Image (spheres, helix red, strand yellow):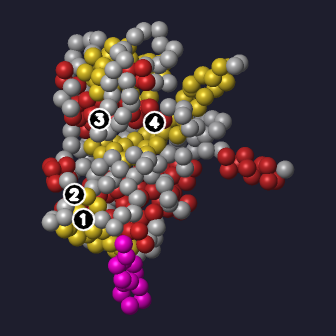
Amino acid sequence: MIRALRLRDFKCFSDARLVLAPLTVLSGTNGSGKSSVIQSLLALRQSWEQGLLARNVLALNGDWIRLGTGRDVLNEDAERDHIELELEHDAGVSAWRFAYAAREELEGALPATPLPELALFRDDFQYLCAERSGPRSSFAMVDHLVRNQRFLGAAGQYTAQFLAELGEEPVRPGPLMRTDAEPSLLKQTAAWLDLVAAGPRLYVQTFRDMDVVQLQFAFSHRLGETMRYRPTNVGFGLTYTLPVIVALLSARPGGLVIVENPEAHLHPQGQADMGRMLALAAASGVQVLVETHSDHVLNGIRIAVKQALLSHEELALHFFTWQRNGRESQHVHRSPRMNAQGRLDHWPEGFFDQWERSLDQLLD
């Protein structure tokens, strides 16, 4: 497991060390560095997939992210012409230093680092970006990525095929297992989809001659169940949440799941339940890194900690913002700690406090 991430002269970070836990929550104002934390990991991942990291080269553009050139990733106030990425993990520390160049690949300025045995560099990895695939009448198929790499796609675009191919696999026993549903991935996914709607049922069908998969939803009805509906006729929430649920349910112990904005298109109760699900996934042995703007997601995690579903010691919170210093703005991050009752040792200004601010204005 990754225990900490250190970034030096990478984008907005001059020098920052972030503790990572089984469940790590990134929050903060827009443009304050949350996505840059994730991008640093994705840059290492795509460099490994392209076979470049073993040659001590960092690929800034690829299937996972497109960062541009060295000019786009070197901190503008850097005093040195290189960036450093460092991972602290169970086996020690792995560090990379890449020399600045105005191109899409950065050459290493240190001897190549042996790759650690981490999920970041294995197939036990999923990343779901904020801009996921919305409702479609059909979804494309990519056999190799789904069957061999168990890949959902960064936008979740292969989730329907994943369920069609692997939906009968049993979900591992543990905190995420719903006792009110059969243990198969398809049935467990449908059970967890009640975060969005009551009693959904999933149907997937492949059309090999056209290389597409059809996904349909039905719902509980007094006569059994409703007719089957296309995703385009049931709203965004079901399709947008589906990849997140499948990623968490299918992840193996020791795996790594990175999710941006899991609350998208979920109502408040669903967002809180999503926070609880993220906590249960971390309690199942999966390392989860989530970026969120939702106080409901945070409160769902806090309640899970209070209910002892996840230890407070297995949680890391990081809040990113900009602090004004005269005419200049300085990037800062703070890391509140949570106790076993789900309470924080301090509440930084701007950290999920807008509800209280608005209420104060209404009551004034």
Asked whether residue 236 is in view, the answer is yes
**Amino acid type for the residue under numbered disc 2:** Met
Q: Work out whether residue 158 or residue 208 is closer to the camera in this orientation and state it.
A: 208
User: On the image, numbered disc 2 is attached to which residue?
Assistant: 141
User: On the image, numbered disc 4 is attached to which residue?
Assistant: 35
Circle 1/circle 3 CB separation < 8 Å: no
User: On the image, numbered disc 3 is attached to which residue?
Assistant: 62
Q: Is residue 219 left or right of residue 142?
A: right
Query: How far apart in space, not on screen, are marks 2 and 3 (Cα)?
Result: 20 Å
Q: Work out whether residue 109 or residue 88 is closer to the camera in this orientation and state it.
A: 109
In the image, residue 134 lies at what x, y percent? 40, 59
Sequence order check, earlier mark of 2 and 3: 3
Q: Is residue 152 left or right of residue 211?
A: right
Crowding near the residue tagged with mark 4, few <14, some 14–19, many ≥20 C-alpha atoms within 10 Å: some
Q: On screen, 101 above or below 217?
A: above
**Amino acid type for the residue under numbered disc 1:** Val
Question: Which quadrant holds the N terminus?
Answer: top left
Crowding near the residue tagged with mark 1, few <14, some 14–19, many ≥20 C-alpha atoms within 10 Å: many
Sequence order check, earlier mark of 4 and 3: 4
Crowding near the residue tagged with mark 3, few <14, some 14–19, many ≥20 C-alpha atoms within 10 Å: some
Q: Which residues are magenta?
A: 218-230
User: On the image, numbered disc 1 is attached to which residue?
Assistant: 213
